[in-house]
Image: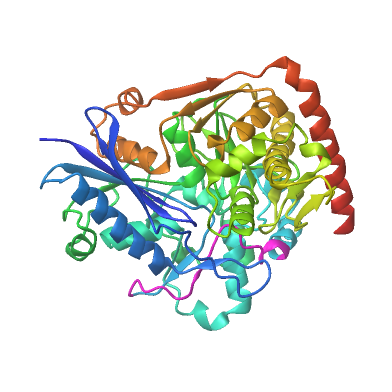
Amino acid sequence: MRKLLLGLDIGSSSVKASLLDADSGTALVAKAFPSEEMPISSPKSGWAEQDPEMWWKYVQQASKYVLDKAQVKKGELKGIGIAYQMHGLVLVDENQQVLRSSIIWCDSRAVEIGEKAFERLGEEYCLNNLLNSPGNFTASKLRWIIENEPDLVSRIHKIMLPGDYIAMKLTGEILTSETGLSEGIFWDFQKNGISEKLLEDYQILKEWIPDVVPSFSLQGKVTSQASKLTGIEEGVPVSYRAGDQPNNAFSLKVLKPGELATTAGTSGTVYGVCDTPLFDPLSRVNTFVHVNHQKNTPSYGVLLCVNGTGILNSWIKRLMGAGKIEYDEMNNFAASAGIGADGLLFIPFGNGAERILQNKQVGAHMIGLDLLKHDKGHMIRAAQEGIVAALTYGFQIMKDMGLDLQTVKAGRANMFLSPIFRKTFIHMNRVELKLYDTDGAQGAARGAGIGAGIFTNEAEAFEGLQLLETYEPNENFFEPYEELFSRWKNCLEEVQKMHI
């Protein structure tokens, strides 16, 4: 009988399911729903919300699809892993009914709340105990609810992250994890527990916080009702959960100090692992509990995030192609322009407040447009170079914190499918890039195998992980990309002055 593992990745663009064969370590089938990007509601400028029931609907469709496609028989599915978009807030009442739309990761409404809390709690406490400013994270979003929607407060039974919500829908159990609480800035790293001081300051009731379970553990079993809706056999355990960036690092076997992972989907990230609780004094990059953290063997993840990444590329696709151009064609257009796109620059910050800019909203800007010479290729290349420049800007912050950035791992997906994006990335940052055949859903499935005891160790879990390509930088390109980044950085400084 086969031993199969189901990974679910709950993104803001789509929900993806991947079915992994535990013996071979290979994915049998994967599918994302819907075919077009899920809608994000923006009732006011800077707001971003999604209906959690929408995620659950697509979990049902994706699960049924992969299970049917692989003709899964009774007893073959051994565990379920859940990865999810970080920093979202889901509220439910005593009947596990959602009280309002989820305020998701790119929502900027709580920036001022986090800044004021940083002043009240004090820099020393926030940086030494929370390793971050409360910023625009989940705790601050909850405080916004308390201040602005008081009628809901008396009805709150539990607060959850998006992955906690999906686990609840599958199992009926409301739980969370240490890494999840740390991403919401609820975690006191000195006490290795929930920050009572933050809860008191924000007037958050401790009973709203779910019980905590390890990322790799048995976290409830699929109910009969969920089984009918998803096609998943009743009694299969949920045995892993993690936010998308810690999970992406895990899916690439980035688990030891000095190892780094990157993504370039809707947002762009670099995630570095360390064994000491590092922090940036300005909270431009953020430190969370990593999935393999143990009290005696601590493990932390430092996250650099650029909100305006793939969303800029998809915006250009919609604008230029009107649905008739594909990403491969866009990449071909980009290759027709030279390094620096003949003077055209993109500042890609158009998707909410950006942490690397201290939670400022400076918007996206196209600079240097010449109507007599610039075409599609220049615009697409300038956008991709601008995204890499933003990541490089964050890279430099991570280097100043002491992280060693020499080799970076990524899944061969999203913007890393673009040769121009890859070339710009390795030369502007002077790093080696390794691309693997994996994604967040596949990583969640591997995590489920560890949590359910199907894999006896991490090495066994990653036996099927396949390295596809390695890209080494060529020093002949260092100077032109260094000049490009310098010009981009100067333009960013001028744009920031406009928004003071």
Q: Is residue 102 magenta?
A: yes
Position of residue 90 relative to residue 492, above or below, is below
Residue 127 horizontal side relative to residue 480, left or right: left
Residue visible at 55% across and 54% down? 184
Residue 259 percent location from the top left of the image: 54, 26
Query: Taking 258 as reference, is 458 left or right?
Result: left
Q: Quadrant of the C terminus?
A: bottom right
Q: In the image, residue 97 lies at what x, y percent?
A: 37, 74
Q: Decide if residue 228 is in sight here.
A: yes
The colour mode here is rainbow
Q: Quadrant of the N terminus?
A: top left
Q: Please tell me how many numbered marks the rendered image carries.
A: 0
- Is residue 16 or residue 340 the one in the foreground? 340
Vertical position of residue 452 compared to residue 176: above or below: above
In this rendering, does residue 18 appear at all?
no
- Which secondary structure dominates the residues rendered in magenta? loop
Image coordinates of residue 118 in percent, x first then y, are 72, 56
Residue bounds of the magenta highlight = 95-112
106 part of magenta stretch: yes
Residue placed most toward the observer, 76 or 257: 76
Q: Judge left or right: residue 408 versus residue 172.
A: right
Q: Residue furthest bottom?
A: 151
Residue at the spot 65% in from the left edge and 19% down from the top edge: 473
In the displayed image of the protein, which residue is found farthest to the front? Answer: 372
Percent coordinates x, y for residue 188 in the rendering: 57, 47
Residue placed at 31% from the left, 55% from the top? 62
- Up the image or down, 235 lies above or below 256; here it is below
Determine the image quadrant of residue 408: top right
Residue at point 58%, 79% (across, down):
149
Q: Nearer the viewer, residue 90 or 470?
A: 470
207 left or right of 442? Answer: right
Front-most of residues 315 and 492: 315
